[in-house]
């Protein structure tokens, strides 16, 4: 009996009409990269920069791409106070020299970033217990030492980075506590005294999306202008997403600084496409959104009078190098090149702004 049932089952199974097999359509690879025919620097009439580090300058694959695509460099972290300012009157200029040696032989520019930043204070300075006067003396010697450091390859510096809170209040950093509310002006003055040919920048995020912060920065610039404090340019960090902030507030901030005649640096560009961390891989749709956003940003930069275009700098080379991955704690693809140094559509978006 058991065999009969088994036989019937097998028989019935054989009788079940077989679904026609789905034809196998080869899955198309999502297109997130492309074959570039033009480099960024051959497309743009202004300087195009990238943030890097000394180790990267010794990596052949990396430098080949840097040489092709960029003519300006910023140190991602090695030209900050916590690295350079070893003790009261002692400095480490090794990274400046490494960058300078690299860029000099290539006719590139190295932009200094950043003399003062509340997030890069050496711990010995954070625990400083001396007088306010001594604090100022130490800061003056450090700023002037960095600006006048030989060889003089660094012809521009972000003197102060992120001095305002998100709401536009002056950040209550150790610099403000020890040197008073006018410390920013003081630092610019010291830097200028050390070398009057060096272009001095104020650099910040948030001025492109928060009116309070923009207003605070503009008030500072106007005040500097009225008092003859030497400042030459503004850095907009430009850490944005493919759809945020919308272009209007960015344009408003850029126009306001442009109409005052300062140099403008889009100083730390990256474009996030995975804000909520939902994606595990970059897909074509996101890559195209990022491409369009890139074009939009470069189109805006192109409206700035040429003599005020200091350049656009990307905050890293490859997606996997981006600081945002650690900062936000999820995978991101915010830069121009993928992990294998392939040109992403974002690169195409940049080049297309000039077509
Ligand atoms: C970041 C670097 O990317 C990191 O490698 C470093 O550890 C911390 O600083 N705004 C700035 C940059 O002005 O200096 C920051 O760079 C990113 C935010």
Image: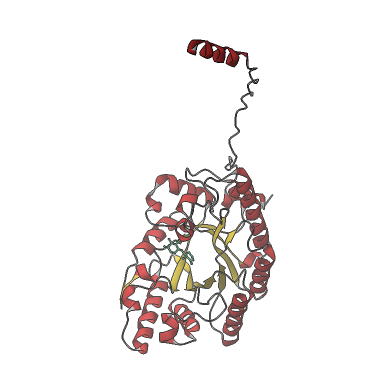
With 110 as the anchor, is 18 left or right in this view?
Answer: right
Residue in the image at 49% along x and 44% along y: 341
Q: Residue 273 location, x and y as percent? A: 58, 53
Q: Residue 326 location, x and y as percent? A: 44, 58
* Residue 108 in view of the camera: no
Of residues 61 and 152, the one drawn nearer to the viewer in this rendering: 61
Of residues 256 and 43, the one drawn nearer to the viewer in this rendering: 256
* Residue 286 in view of the camera: yes
Residue in the image at 69% along x and 66% along y: 248
With 1 as the anchor, is 222 left or right in this view?
Answer: right
- Residue 290's place in the image compared with 264, above or below, is above
Q: Residue 298 location, x and y as percent? A: 64, 57
Applied colour scheme? secondary structure
- Residue 26's place in the image compared with 34, above or below, is above
Q: Quadrant of ligand 1?
A: bottom left
With 85 as the anchor, is 234 left or right in this view?
Answer: right
- Residue 334's place in the image compared with 250, above or below, is above
Residue in the image at 59% along x and 71% along y: 207
Of residues 212 and 132, the one drawn nearer to the viewer in this rendering: 212
Residue in the image at 47% along x and 42% along y: 340
With 288 as the anchor, is 127 left or right in this view?
Answer: left
């Amino acid at each position: 009996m058991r065999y009969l049932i088994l036989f019937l089952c097998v028989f019935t199974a054989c009788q079940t009409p077989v679904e026609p097999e789905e034809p196998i359509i080869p899955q198309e690879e999502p297109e997130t990269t492309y074959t570039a025919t033009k480099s960024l620097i051959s497309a743009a009439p202004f300087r195009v920069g990238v943030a890097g580090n000394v180790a990267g300058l010794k990596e052949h694959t990396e430098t080949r791409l840097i040489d092709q695509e960029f003519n300006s460099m910023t140190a991602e972290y090695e030209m900050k106070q916590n690295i350079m300012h070893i003790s009261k009157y002692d400095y480490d200029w090794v990274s400046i020299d490494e960058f300078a040696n690299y860029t000099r032989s290539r006719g590139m520019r190295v932009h200094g970033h950043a003399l003062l930043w509340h997030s890069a204070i050496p711990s010995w300075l954070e625990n400083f217990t001396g007088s306010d006067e001594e604090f100022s003396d130490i800061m003056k010697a450090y700023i002037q030492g960095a600006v006048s450091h030989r060889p003089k390859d660094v012809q521009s510096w972000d003197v102060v980075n992120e001095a305002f809170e998100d709401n536009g209040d002056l950040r209550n950093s150790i610099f403000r506590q020890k040197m008073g509310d006018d410390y920013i002006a003081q630092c610019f003055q010291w830097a200028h005294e050390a070398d009057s040919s060096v272009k001095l920048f104020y650099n910040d995020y948030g001025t492109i999306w928060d009116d309070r912060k923009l207003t605070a920065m503009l008030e500072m610039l106007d005040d500097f202008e009225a008092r003859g404090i030497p400042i030459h340019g503004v850095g907009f960090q430009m850490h944005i997403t493919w759809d945020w902030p919308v272009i209007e507030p960015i344009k408003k901030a850029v126009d306001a600084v442009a109409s005052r005649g300062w140099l403008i640096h889009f100083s730390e560009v990256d474009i996030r496409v995975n804000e909520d961390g939902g994606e595990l891989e970059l897909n074509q749709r996101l890559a195209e959104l990022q491409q369009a956003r890139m074009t939009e940003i470069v189109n805006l930069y192109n409206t700035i009078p040429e003599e005020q275009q200091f350049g656009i700098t990307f905050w890293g080379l490859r997606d996997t190098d981006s600081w945002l991955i650690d900062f936000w704690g999820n995978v991101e693809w915010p830069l121009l090149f993928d992990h294998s140094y392939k040109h992403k559509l974002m690169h195409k978006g940049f080049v297309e702004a000039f077509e």
